[in-house]
Amino acid sequence: MKGLANLKIKTLKSTETCPIHHIPLEYLKGMKPFCVECQREETEREKKQQVEDFKIESVRSVLTKLSLVDDASEYNHTFKNFDAPEGTREVQIKKQTRMIAYRYLKDRDDEFNTIMYGTPGQGKTHLAMAMLNAVNDNAKQPQKCLFVNTVSLIQAIKDSWDDPTARWTEKYAIKLLKGVDLLVLDDLGSESAMNVGDKTASQFVQDILYKVTNRQHRIITTTNLTLDQLQRVYNAKLVSRLRAGSRNSAIDFTGITDKRY
Ligand SMILES: Nc1ncnc2c1ncn2[C@@H]1O[C@H](COP(=O)(O)OP(=O)(O)OP(=O)(O)O)[C@@H](O)[C@H]1O
Ligand SMILES: [Mg+2]
Ligand SMILES: [Zn+2]
């Protein structure tokens, strides 16, 4: 019967009336009578639901559509596929990052940053993505989640300099990073060997992040640098902003072995 009311088909009037709208039901020969008004309302509800589903889907797809990852396989990192054998430091770190993800997930207005630092291959990127995936998949009110690898970000902006059609201009990057609900900044500090025009890459990143952190207060940063090293590479004000609210969400990966070997 769906949509019948919208079609210009001649129906017959039944002697029954709709208990809700108190108008006569209509019917086609051999078919069940229906209320035109109930039909119209149902179609309206379906349309609204479709619009709602579309909105949710467009928020959820930000992660895979707009992120800058090193390698697309990183989208597959979850808590589920993060091994944490009993008695290892991995167990604690998994639990800790899960709890932090839950805080981001349950309250969009809970503003605090997270810093995960340690040596290579310890699972920082893995767990940062796991946190994003958890929020992206489970937030009741969908949240825009974005993952940005620092070197990829610089590369993308550099590429835009001689491509007028490029999306990742500096302006676009700042606006996007500011505007999402949860941002992962992956591998901060790994840009140190690069140069960007007449600036060092670290200065370049610093200038961008300074503008981003003006408004963005939900950033998960992963880095190979210690807090001391961060203070030496970037200015104190930026480091302080990146650490804002991270008293309970600074995670030292010391004690975890390199999983790349
Ligand atoms: N506990 C774990 N269980 C399953 N896979 C893991 C675990 N820890 C790390 N890995 C895997 O090992 C690889 C390296 O981990 P990851 O990229 O997260 O390290 P990282 O700490 O970010 O290193 P880097 O500092 O070099 O960026 C990834 O493929 C990741 O999925
Ligand atoms: Mg990493
Ligand atoms: Zn009705």
Image (cartoon, rainbow, N blue to C red):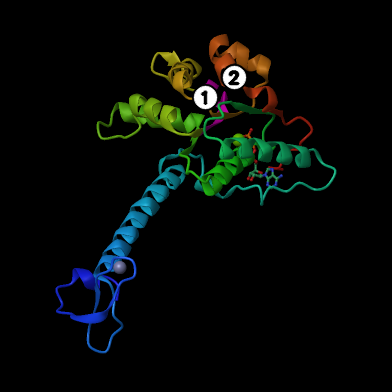
Instruction: Identify which amino acid the numbered label 2 is placed on.
Output: Ala
The residues tagged by marks 2 and 1 sit, at their Cα atoms, a distance apart of: 8 Å
Residues packed near mark 1 inside 10 Å, few (<14), some (14 to 19) or many (20 plus) = many
At x 50%, y 29%, the residue is: 150
**Is 104 located above or below residue 17 in the figure?**
above
- Secondary structure of the residue carrying numbered label 2: loop
- Is any atom of residue 121 visible in this view? no
Q: Which residue is mark 1?
A: 217
State yes or no: discs 2 and 1 in contact (Cβ < 8 Å).
Answer: yes
- Residue 153: x and y, percent? 44, 30
In the rendered structure, which amino acid carries the disc numbered 1?
A: His
The quadrant the N terminus occupies is bottom left
Q: Which residue is mark 2?
A: 244
User: At 34% from the left edge and 61% from the top edge, which residue is drawn?
Assistant: 46
Q: Which residues are magenta?
A: 183-193
- Determine whether, in the image, residue 229 is placed left or right of residue 72: right
Q: Residue at x 48, y 25 (%)?
A: 216
Quadrant of the snapshot with the C terminus: top right
Q: Quadrant of residue 215?
A: top left
Label 1 element class: loop
